[in-house]
Amino acid sequence: MVARVIEVDPFDLIVFGATGDLAHRKLLPALYHRDLDGQIPEDARIIACSRRDMSDEQYRAFADEAVREHVDDVEAPALERFLARLSYLAVDAAGTRGWPELAERLEGREDVVRAFYLAVSPDFFGTICKRIGEHDLTTDLARVVIEKPIGKDGASARALNAAIGEVFREDQIFRIDHYLGKETVQNLMALRFANALFEPLWNAAHIDHVQITVAESLGVEGRAGYYDTAGAMRDMVQNHILQLLCLVAMEPPESMDADSVRDEKLKVLKALKQMDAEMASKATVRGQYRAGASAGGAVRGYLEELDDPTSQTETFVAIKAEIANWRWANVPFYLRTGKRLAARVSEIVVQFRPIPHSIFETEAGAISSNRLVIRLQPDEGVRMQIMIKDPGPGGMRLRQVPLDMSFATAFKVRNPDAYERLIMDVIRGNQTLFMRRDEVEAAWAWVDPILEDWATLKDLPKGYTSGTWGPSAAIALIERDGRTWFEDLI
């Protein structure tokens, strides 16, 4: 099976922070793959910008290293063609250096798509956009891409959105969440809205609960400084996990038009039941990893990695969330994320209700409820667990088996990285997989009170040993309801 490649129009992609970790690990390998597949037109240019003094050839050497490190089976002619597209310009985001030269380089190409990718600290988003406006670099075909975190709370998010909005129209702003670019996340839309099988059952009458887990086996690594100002709630729940929740819970949109999809996601965010301090103490768990073991051996605890014994930043969060609408009344959504957990896995588990009555004898065995497991990483796929008769003579014996579809097995094509799809969507101007301003602010409107409740309660994060599934309180959170976390790795 050959993947279909949809061509895009010529473009200029200007990457700020082009010598940083995101560019090295994700953006440059993603762009190489798109060029390898013939999706990038000949007239397209990639202009790398950073404060560091560097020649075009030096930057191409940096990009060559990035591609060879993060891409399997690099094709030398294709890599040479890709590197030839790259040029470099030293630009001071907070100052004046390099901006006139950038304006000169873009002059005369006002009729092609012009995308500014801000792969920098959020502290520079507003400043860079202001400089873009001052040097009159925006056009009708301009776009700007910003990474999370978008603010540290609702107030700072609104201020940041306002600053960017002074230069770019809302339809030109692409707030990227790479989770939404994953193949399985988009297949969730296909499962729900392209099949008659699931949608009639996708409600409180048939679904018992939903679990969303984003687990990481690594610690904070080189991000300790940033992470200690954010924590798991701001870093993962406010954006990635709530976006996944929206895709599971939203009503069918009118169409796949960007605003139709985002209108329905916004309704879910607004329907999330707000928590007061009492609810937050019962329905949320904060954790912080301690020393333990991983596949690579013994690891230090968060406080040792941070070298600050007083930090109260959470590295784990578990939440029992509820959506106050007819479709999801009394269906809990259990959300869980953390670092230094037992495995690296991101998945959505939809647990259906048990059958109302069994016609089978006790000897046939217990009947387990159906379960849909949507795996986002590391091995993307979908599994439906159903009951069947165990083959062979000797009477009726029931067992649960998976209907399993691994994307790597089902489709003999390379599974593209999320950034490949999202960057091309930016060039096309397709905002379906990007967050709208009111979505971001609605997510903060639910998260902010929980953060405030935690501060009021002064409840320290509960310790958990690295290499486990988090603090015991997270297990109690779900088991109080007679349920358990799904940890049967695909």
Image (cartoon, rainbow, N blue to C red):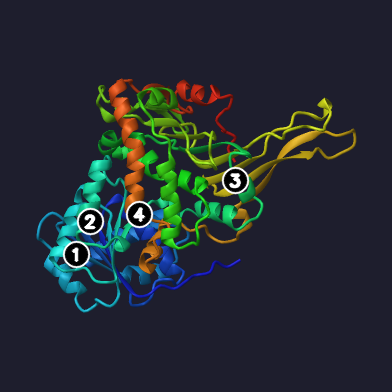
- Label whose residue precedes the other's in the sequence (3 or 2): 2
**Distance of mark 1 from mark 3, alpha carbons?**
51 Å
**Secondary structure of the residue carrying numbered label 4:** loop
Mark 4, residue position:
436
The quadrant where residue 453 appears: top left
Q: How far apart are marks 4 and 1 (CA)?
A: 31 Å
On residue 164, which mark appears?
Answer: 2
Q: Tell which tag, 4 or 1, sits nearer the viewer.
A: 4
Q: Which of the two discs, 4 and 3, labels the residue nearer the N terminus? A: 3
Quick one: SS at disc 2?
helix
Q: Determine crowd level at label 2: few under 14, some 14-19, many 20+ residues with C-alpha closer than 10 A.
A: many
Q: In the image, which disc is placed on residue 89?
A: 1
Distance from Cα at disc 4 to Cα at disc 3: 25 Å
Percent position of residue 341, x then y: 45, 31
Q: Nearer the viewer, mark 1 or mark 3?
A: 3
| Crowdedness near tag 1: few (<14), some (14–19) or many (≥20) residues, C-alpha within 10 Å | many
The reply to whether the C-beta atoms of the residues labelled 1 and 3 are less than 8 Å apart is no
Q: What residue type is labelled 3?
A: Trp
Badges 4 and 3: C-beta atoms under 8 Å apart? Answer: no
Identify which residue, 460 or 88, lies in the foreground: 460
Q: Earlier in the sequence, mark 1 or mark 3?
A: 1
Spatial CA span between label 4 and label 2: 13 Å
Percent coordinates x, y for residue 26 in the rendering: 37, 54
- The image shows residue 13 at horizontal and vertical percentages of 29, 66
CB atoms of marks 4 and 2 within 8 Å:
no
Cα separation, mark 2 vs mark 1, equals 23 Å
The residue where tag 3 is placed is 202
Name the outermost residue toward the left.
Answer: 96
Front-lying residue, 66 or 182:
182
Using the rendered view, name the quadrant where residue 229 is placed: top left
